[in-house]
Image (cartoon, coloured by chain):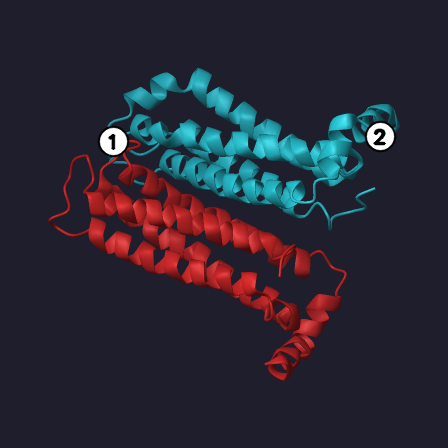
Chain colours: A cyan, B red
């Protein structure tokens, strides 16, 4: 299934950058630390916004709650960078792991869901009056976001334990 | 201390979890500990950011519902954390970095309670900027959670 990935994985694994990063002992633990601090920012800030879409604190406008979202992007950027370092240092551990591809799949779902919200839900969001119940479409976006971020975390944290890594 | 730690670690319930190959044993407990971390620390970060001036149109009082949700994350992590400790008590019980983590979590939770009580006081301003004391609370909380997360993560590497 992953045979076509072998040349790329080997190229990355043998690259100067991979060898350089692999030989600095503190790089991996540092990136783990950054990855977990970033994880909390994504889960907490996006989770807060998802709770609002689900109808919590509906006296506050959705647009006001959305002002925190750049900080979820900061957390996401931290995790994208630290995640890329893991991938460069040990590409085989991820590229050949079905569990990691499930994680990527749910990242794509979370991203597509956010894109639908950004491009299709603006009018609905602005039309909502304070205290008014959240319409089904907005609730669905919030629920799908919470579920997909849970599975991103699930397959990420379970990567060493689910199925064979190699 | 070692005999007590070994006694805990050798209790049948913890031996069976430690020796189980099931993903529902150790891996699931570890995963839930990460879920609780994200929820507790992440939601507290939202309040801290608000006190520091992010999202000014969100009234401070609307966080009242958010604090009990942070406690769900705390109780989940206390339960999963006790299990994770007991599985490996004779190792973790001797790690200085584990005590650094424990201390920073205790301080962060005390600060979370102080922050909540401060925000809900009648004399707490309804508009920005938040008082200097609230901003100090927010920065201290952010740093304590970063230290707790870092020391917790580094237990796998240090000490």
Image vertical order of residue B77 relative to residue B14, above or below: above
Q: Which residue is mark 2?
A: A2
- Which residue sits at x=38%, y=51%? B69
Residue B132 to residue B23: above or below: above
User: In the shown orientation, is residue A10 left or right of residue A39?
Assistant: right
Residue A151 visible in rendering:
no
Is B154 or B126 nearer to us in this picture?
Answer: B154
Q: Secondary structure at mark 2?
A: loop
Please state if B132 lies on the left or on the right of B52 as rendered.
left
Both marks 1 and 2 on one chain:
no
Checking the image for residue B133, the label placed there is: none
Q: Quadrant of the N terminus of chain A?
A: top right
Q: Residue at x 74, y 32 (%)?
A: A20
The quadrant holding residue B43 is top left
Residue B97: x and y, percent? 55, 61
Pointer 1 indicates a residue of which chain?
B
Callout 1 secondary element:
loop
Q: What residue sits 72% from the left and 31% below the top?
A: A88
Q: Residues within 10 Å of mark 1 (few under 14, many from 20)?
A: some
Q: Chain of mark 2?
A: A
Which label sits in the foreground, 1 or 2?
Answer: 1
**As drawn, is B53 to the left or to the right of A15?**
left
Is residue A82 at least partly visible in the picture? yes
Q: Is residue A21 above or below residue A125?
A: below
Numbered disc total: 2
Image quadrant holding the C terminus of chain A, namely top right
Q: Position of residue B3 (x, y in %)?
A: 64, 83
Badge 2: residue crowd in 10 Å (few <14, some 14–19, many ≥20): few
Q: Which residue is mark 1?
A: B56
Residue B90 x %, y %: 65, 73
Give the CA separation, mark 1 to mark 2.
49 Å
């Amino acid at each position: 299934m992953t045979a076509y990935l072998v040349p790329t994985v080997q190229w990355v694994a043998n690259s100067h950058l991979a060898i350089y990063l692999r030989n600095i002992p503190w790089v991996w633990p540092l990136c783990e630390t950054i990855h977990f601090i970033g994880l909390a920012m994504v889960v907490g800030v996006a989770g807060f916004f998802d709770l609002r879409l689900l109808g919590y604190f509906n006296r506050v406008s959705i647009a006001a709650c959305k002002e925190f979202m750049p900080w979820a992007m900061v957390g996401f950027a931290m995790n994208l960078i630290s995640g890329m370092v893991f991938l460069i240092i040990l590409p085989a551990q991820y590229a050949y792991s079905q569990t990691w591809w499930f994680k990527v799949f749910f990242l794509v779902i979370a991203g597509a869901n956010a894109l639908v919200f950004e491009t299709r839900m603006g009018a609905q969001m602005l039309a909502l009056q304070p205290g008014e119940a959240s319409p089904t479409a907005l609730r669905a976006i919030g629920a799908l976001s919470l579920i997909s971020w849970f599975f991103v975390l699930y397959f990420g944290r379970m990567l060493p334990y689910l199925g064979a890594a190699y | 201390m070692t005999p007590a730690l070994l006694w805990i670690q050798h209790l049948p319930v913890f031996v069976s979890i430690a020796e189980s190959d099931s993903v529902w044993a150790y891996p699931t407990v570890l995963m839930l500990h990460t879920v609780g971390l994200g929820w507790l620390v992440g939601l507290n970060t939202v309040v801290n950011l608000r006190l520091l001036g992010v999202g000014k149109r969100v009234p401070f009082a609307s966080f009242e519902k958010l604090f009990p949700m942070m406690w769900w994350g705390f109780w989940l992590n206390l339960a999963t954390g006790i299990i994770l400790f007991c599985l490996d008590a004779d190792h973790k019980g001797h790690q200085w970095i584990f005590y650094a983590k424990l201390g920073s979590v205790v301080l962060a939770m005390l600060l979370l309670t102080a922050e909540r009580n401060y925000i809900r006081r009648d004399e707490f301003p309804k508009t920005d900027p938040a008082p200097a004391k609230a901003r100090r609370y927010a920065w201290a909380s952010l740093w304590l959670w970063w230290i707790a997360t870092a020391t917790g993560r580094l237990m796998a590497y240090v000490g």
